[in-house]
Image: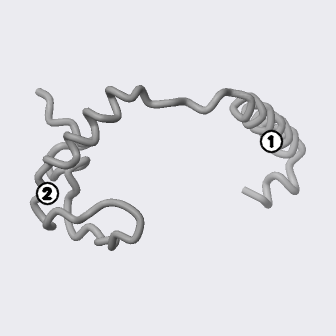
Amino acid sequence: MGDLIATDPQWARAAAQLSGALDAVAGDLARLPTPTLPDDLAARLDAALRTAETPHAPAAPHGPGSPVVPATGPTPAHPAGHPGGSRRP
């Protein structure tokens, strides 16, 4: 694609416009306030994650200094046979 941008004026114009648009979007996003998670939702998510079963690994402690265990198979967020991780019908 770099060759096309370097040699084709239409590609060069399109790349310049896209670059400018991406910069504008990045600026807009940087000005947005940092989103926050409501405390009640955070507590519910924490409770659900503490009790979630993982078929491939035992529960591990969470927090600073906790070991990181690499996934060896489908994760609870993306179980086999369920693209996107949704188990809803």
- Of residue 54 and residue 78, the one placed in the foreground of this image is 54
- Of residue 85 and residue 59, the one placed in the foreground of this image is 59
* Residue under label 2: 54
Q: Secondary structure at mark 1?
A: helix
Residue 35 position in % (x across, y down): 55, 30
Residue 31 position in % (x across, y down): 74, 29
* Residue under label 1: 19
**Mark 2 → mark 1, Cα distance in angstroms:** 43 Å
**Which label is found at residue 81?**
none
Residue 7 position in % (x across, y down): 87, 55
Q: Nearer the viewer, mark 2 or mark 1?
A: 2
In the picture, measured across the screen, residue 52 lies left or right of residue 15, that is: left
Q: Residue, x 11% and y 27% (percent of image)?
A: 89
Display coloring: one colour
Q: Earlier in the sequence, mark 2 or mark 1?
A: 1
Q: Secondary structure at mark 2?
A: loop
**Label 1, residues with CA under 10 Å away: few <14, some 14-19, many ≥20:** few
- Residue type at tag 1: Ser
In the picture, measured across the screen, residue 28 lies left or right of residue 8, that is: left
- Residue type at tag 2: Thr
Q: How many marks?
A: 2
Please say if 41 is above or below 52.
above
Q: Which quadrant does the N terminus fall into?
A: bottom right
**Label 2, residues with CA under 10 Å away: few <14, some 14-19, many ≥20:** few
State which quadrant residue 33 falls in. Answer: top right
Please say if 38 is above or below 80.
above
